[in-house]
Image (cartoon, rainbow, N blue to C red):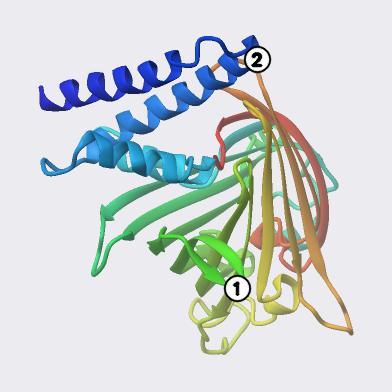
Amino acid sequence: MKACVLLLSAIFVANGANGANGTNSINSAESASTKLEGANKCLLNALEQATPEQTVGELRQGCADKAPTLFKQRVELEKQASKNPFAIIPHKPNFVLPASVTSINQEPYVGTPVASKLDNVEIKFQVSLKYLFMQNLIFKDLDLQFAFTTTSWWQAYNSDISAPFRETNYEPEVIFNYHHAWSLLGLPVEQTTLSFNHQSNGQTGQLSRSWNRVILGFAFAPADNVLWGFRTWYRLPENEKKTALDPSGDDNPDIERYMGYGEIGGLWSISDKHSLEFMLRNNLRSDNNRGAIQLGWSFPINDRIQGYIEYFNGYGESLIYYNHHAHRLGIGFKLTNWL
């Protein structure tokens, strides 16, 4: 009841202040109306997290200090969703690309039942979820999260070999996420993450690929609709295999020569439901320089689903192809985006 009274009071005060300038032009009125709508949303979010001691004036001042960026809005929405015991939060984008065209490299599959029988057209899809295990761990705005991402390349149209899943990459993570703004060399950092990451393709024998990393990431929001960041990682060492088919030991000791030690990415939210994104990766070697680029365009289909076009060129789209150059163009649907 108190929250309702506070909200009505805050909206009434804001509307009254807006009405006091009734002689302004139509454009000014429309601008004020837009700002008012944003202020009311901010007040509603603030009231849901307010303590009994906070006043309406303090909440209004907090909303007036800085309008929330799209990144901040996602953080707040995730906190709200975490209160629902039936909700699981998206981590990376969730999407399906029913039309995904590539040039399949048959080399890794030589000696397997599917050798030389794989099609160049397949379905690629990704499911990525996370759970906010603990908020304000040790200090304010430091959260502990668990995440799991699976990305699959499915030969769904290849009935000659019973439409198998050609490759699936599994990526569980433990993430320490600090989402309090700070400055790094003059750049405004919106989020800092430290994660313990395992990635593997769940295969055995000659098809087995995996690695473990500690990943440090920084995200920057120079504008309300722009987000970019970079990640750098340290691969945890593994013992060498005694034989090529040894189940223990390092499946891919040279993976850093192809995947490098980090990547940079960004997203530009052009308008509601329209966005462009990119990812760049390079091994930073003068000899045998290798890298990858991925570009994406999301566009609206309806209120819940976006169309999605993705292009990839380089090394490491999947673990089975970490040391093979691949290029792919896919079109489909995105269920959840970065923002």
Q: Quadrant location of the N terminus?
A: top left
Query: What residue would you read off at disc 1?
Result: 232
Q: Nearer the viewer, residue 208 or 58?
A: 58
x and y, in percent, of residue 244 in the image: 63, 80
Q: Quick one: label 1 or label 2, which is nearer the N terminus?
A: 2
Q: Nearer the viewer, residue 62 or 210?
A: 62
The numbered dot on residue 27 is 2
Looking at this rendering, what residue extends furthest in the right direction? Answer: 287
x and y, in percent, of residue 33 in the image: 51, 17
Q: Quadrant location of the C terminus?
A: top right
Res. 163 image quadrant: top right
**For the point 25% across and 64% down, which residue is it?**
137
Q: Secondary structure at mark 2?
A: helix
Res. 186 image quadrant: bottom right
The numbered dot on residue 107 is none
x and y, in percent, of residue 125 in the image: 60, 38
**For the point 38% across and 37% down, which residue is it?**
77
**For the point 47% across and 41% down, which residue is it?**
68
x and y, in percent, of residue 92 in the image: 53, 47
Mark 1 or 2: in front is 2
Label 1 amino acid?
Thr
The residues tagged by marks 1 and 2 sit, at their Cα atoms, a distance apart of 47 Å
Q: Are marks 1 and 2 in contact (CB under 8 Å)?
A: no
Q: Mark 2: few, some, or many residues within 10 Å (few <14, many ≥20)?
A: few
The image shows a total of numbered marks equal to: 2
Q: Mark 1: few, some, or many residues within 10 Å (few <14, many ≥20)?
A: some
Left or right of 207 on screen, residue 33: left
Q: Secondary structure at mark 1?
A: strand
Q: Is residue 99 visible?
A: no
Question: In the image, is residue 1 above or below residue 159?
Answer: above
